[in-house]
Image: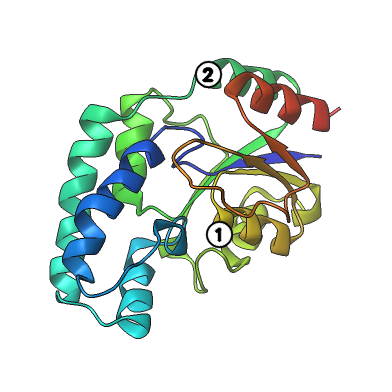
Amino acid sequence: MSAVLFDMDGVIVDSEDYWVELERETILPRVVPDAEVAVAEITGMNYREIYDYLESEYGTAVSREEFLEIFDETAATLYTERVSLLEGFHDLLATLRDRGVAVGLVSSSPHDWIDVVLERFDLEGKFDAVVSAEEIDGAGKPEPDVYEYAAAAIGVPVEECLAVEDSEHGVEAAARAGTTAVAYRIDAHDDPDLSVADVVVDDPDGLWRTVLELLE
């Protein structure tokens, strides 16, 4: 492996702990009040594509503009006040740098949200590429486009990339792109199907250890 591509939400920061609860208890009941929508159906998707999905599958009770405003307002509080960086992440980045491994961030979140995380946790300039699904000319996760784009951005063949994901859609995107997909199982998700991953791990120490072992 020549590169590691990290998802942001649920991997680098514990934002999925908050997003899942907010989507289940507040956002989905407001947007699709007449439907029972499992959070897993939308987890890992770009939030603009979430609206299109909900509108197509269920019909929505709010406009696209209202929907995007709900997410932007929620994100502003969540990323600036609530989330924490996963334990040991700075040390892992330093180790990868020492080994000459390229590092990318591949997220369904927009760059505005990503930038808040990078600044807050002193991660600016620590990645060889920072890719948001919003910038690509293609579909977001679970389609493979964003991982193919990220591999090209750092100049590494996609099959030489290790991808770290926590959601079912994210793992599927990484696997379909041809990366070695490492799934990080977190409590926020209700038993997602991670069967397409090459490896599944359950704790931060195990995740970082697995990443380093797979690079050997």
Give the residue number, with chain letter if any, for mark 1: 169
Q: Residue furthest right?
A: 216
Callout 1: helix, strand or loop?
helix
Type of the residue with mark 2: His
Q: Quadrant of the N terminus?
A: top right
Q: Quadrant of the C terminus?
A: top right
Q: Is residue 55 left or right of residue 133?
A: left
Residue 5: image location, x then y, percent:
62, 43
Which residue is depicted at the point 81% across and 32% down? 214
Which residue is depicted at the point 26% across and 29% down? 82
Is residue 60 visible in the rendered image? The answer is yes
Is the residue marked by circle 1 packed among few (<14), some (14-19), or many (20+) residues within 10 Å? many
In this rendering, is residue 206 above or below 78? above
Choose top left, top right, bottom left or bottom right for residue 63: bottom left
Is 115 in front, or is 49? 49
Q: CA distance from mark 1 to mark 2?
A: 26 Å
Callout 2: helix, strand or loop?
helix
In this rendering, is residue 8 above or below 28? above
In this rendering, is residue 42 above or below 24? below
In this rendering, is residue 56 above or below 116? below
Choose top left, top right, bottom left or bottom right for residue 38: bottom left
Is the residue marked by circle 2 packed among few (<14), some (14-19), or many (20+) residues within 10 Å? some
Type of the residue with mark 1: His
Which residue is depicted at the point 44% across and 56% down? 43
Residue 95: image location, x then y, percent:
67, 18
Give the residue number, with chain letter if any, for mark 2: 90
Which residue is depicted at the point 60% across and 25% down? 203
Instruction: Mark 1 or mark 2: name the one nearer the start of the chain.
Output: 2
Is 108 in front, or is 136? 108
Residue 51: image location, x then y, percent:
30, 72
